[in-house]
Image (cartoon, rainbow, N blue to C red):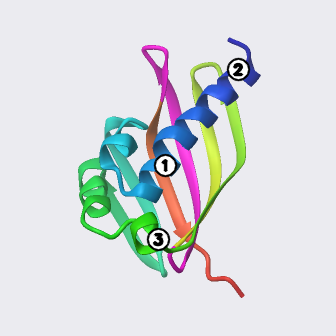
Amino acid sequence: MNTQEEVTAITAVLQQYYFKGLYEGDTSLLARAFLPGTQLFGDVNRQPYAKTLDQYLDGVAHRASPKAAGKTFEPEIIAIDVINSIAIAKLHVKMYDFNYYNFLTFHKVNDKWLIVHKTLTHVAES
């Protein structure tokens, strides 16, 4: 595949599994975007955030989804950069009262693009 085809494939993972899973609170969809064992790091409201994928999915499973709660969910792909079998996606996700920025590292494993690392931060809107 050429780079544009790879970007299209990563965009599909983000839209079909990551964003849809987050919006609907569907952890089986969300898990399909990640490599098992993925680590998540960052800060939320200036507090350190560190979770395993299992801890993250459990949290999503035990909260009201934005869809069910009728809350804001505005995902945006800012950029996707691909080099060979690795890629990084920069995202902006407004969800509930949060204004998240995510950097997702992808790796192509068995011809599938999977998230292998997630970092996130919440930026207060002024």
Q: How many angstroms separate mark 2 from mark 3 (CA)?
A: 33 Å
Is residue 121 magenta-colored?
no
Tell me the kind of residue under disc 2.
Answer: Glu
The circle on residue 20 is: 1
46 relative to 90 in the view: left or right: left
Q: Position of residue 88 (x, y in %)?
A: 61, 39
| Residue 23 against residue 115 in the figure, above or below | below
105 relative to 57 in the view: left or right: right
4 relative to 38 in the view: left or right: right
Q: Which residue, given by chain and number where applicable, does mark 3 sit on?
A: 43
Q: Which residues are magenta?
A: 96-113
Q: Main secondary structure of the magenta part?
A: strand
10 Å crowding of disc 3: few (<14), some (14-19), many (20+): some
Query: In the rendered view of the protein, which quadrant contains the C terminus?
Result: bottom right
Which is more N-terminal, label 1 or label 3? 1
Tell me the kind of residue under disc 3.
Answer: Asp
Is residue 97 magenta-colored?
yes
Which of discs 3 and 1 lies nearer the camera? The answer is 1
Q: Residue drawn 29% across and 53% down?
A: 57
Q: Which residue, given by chain and number where applicable, does mark 2 sit on?
A: 5
Which is more N-terminal, label 2 or label 1? 2
| Residue 109 against residue 101 in the figure, above or below | above
Tell me the element at label 3: strand
Which of discs 2 and 3 lies nearer the camera? The answer is 2
Q: Position of residue 21 (x, y in %)?
A: 42, 49
Q: Residue drawn 35% across and 48% down?
A: 39
Tell me the element at label 2: helix
Q: Position of residue 41 (x, y in %)?
A: 42, 59
Which is more N-terminal, label 3 or label 2? 2
Tell me the kind of residue under disc 1.
Answer: Lys
